[in-house]
Image: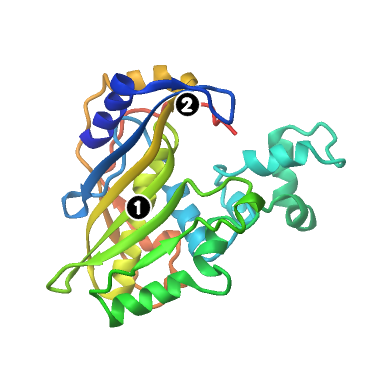
Amino acid sequence: MKQYLDLAKHVLDVGEARADRTSTGTISTFGYQMRFDLREGFPMLTTKKVHFKSVVEELLWFIRGNTNIRPLVLKGVRIWNEWPYADYQKSSEYQGETLQQFVDKIRDDEAFAQKHGDLGPVYGKQWRDFFGVDQIDKLIYNLRHNPFSRRHIISAWNPAEVDQMALPPCHSFMQFYVSSDQKELSLQLYQRSADVFLGVPFNIASYALLLMIVADVCGYQAKEFVHTFGDVHIYNDHLDQIRLQLTRDPRPLPKLSIIKHHANINDYQYEDFLLEGYDPHPHIAGKVSV
């Protein structure tokens, strides 16, 4: 995926040093766009390994309207654990548990998970209940019945509830677009805040998959994912990891197939997707800034 390496190089070349909410510090620039043609392969980063199961399970978790980490924990998906743990550490019930001990409690104790595992009204809540509006259902209905509308939009950014979220939505606004022959569907995402090393590879794969799922439900073929950024940044403690990736040559993109089709978007499972030919360079570790 040359597009990703071009983005990383752009941030290194023209970005400015900035303080940030996490006190880690970043190199940041404002405004960038990448395009991925899904007819040429599935855009999974190959200069480091991306965990495909986590991509799928998190997206299905969003689609179902979930906001508690327990369903992810039960499936071995760890990507949201740090945020509720940080809140738990501030509570009177905190007894010095490590992150892993906290996650074990979330897994084993449903009552504990209900109290300490919720992230507030994050993505899934907004997608499925934006002040009573199910944006996913409305999107699918309109894509089927009014394909050329310019209102095929889902917003995760709800100003009235942002302060109640563990993490305000980084990937915050999306719009779908049907081709003039009514055969193909494209998606553009606006991402207000983008962590180039940890977040962006995951976000690319997640929204490309969302495009494929919505296209499948509505009877279209997935065409193009357009990824538009606001504040796009590399954390200071990820610079070595980014530079390592820039020494690696991108490998051929894998192919992703939906092997079991559904009329209802809520019915998709991890086993319904087949990823073939994914041969990335080795994983590169990096710390999450919370």
Around disc 1, counting alpha carbons within 10 Å, would you say few (fewer than 14), some (14 to 19), or many (20 or more)? many
Query: What residue did someone put label 2 on?
Result: 285
Q: Seen from this angle, which residue lies furthest left?
A: 181
Q: Which is more toward the observer, 121 or 95?
A: 121
Residue beneath the point at 37% across and 34% down: 49
Looking at the image, is 240 positioned above or below residue 144?
above
Classify the position of the C terminus by image quarter.
top right
Q: Alpha-carbon distance for marks 2 and 1?
A: 26 Å
Q: Which is more toward the observer, 93 or 160?
A: 160
Q: Secondary structure at mark 1?
A: strand
Classify the position of the N terminus by image quarter.
top left
Residue beneath the point at 74% across and 51% down: 108
Q: Is residue 167 left or right of residue 152?
A: right
Disc 2 marks which amino acid?
Ala
Q: Which is more toward the observer, 280 or 227?
A: 227
* Callout in the foreground (2, 1): 1
Picture coordinates of residue 179 (x, y %)?
17, 68
Residue 45: image quadrant is: top left
Picture coordinates of residue 147 (x, y %)?
25, 76
Residue beneath the point at 52% across and 68% down: 128
Numbered circle sitting on residue 73: none
Query: What residue did someone put label 1 on?
Result: 189
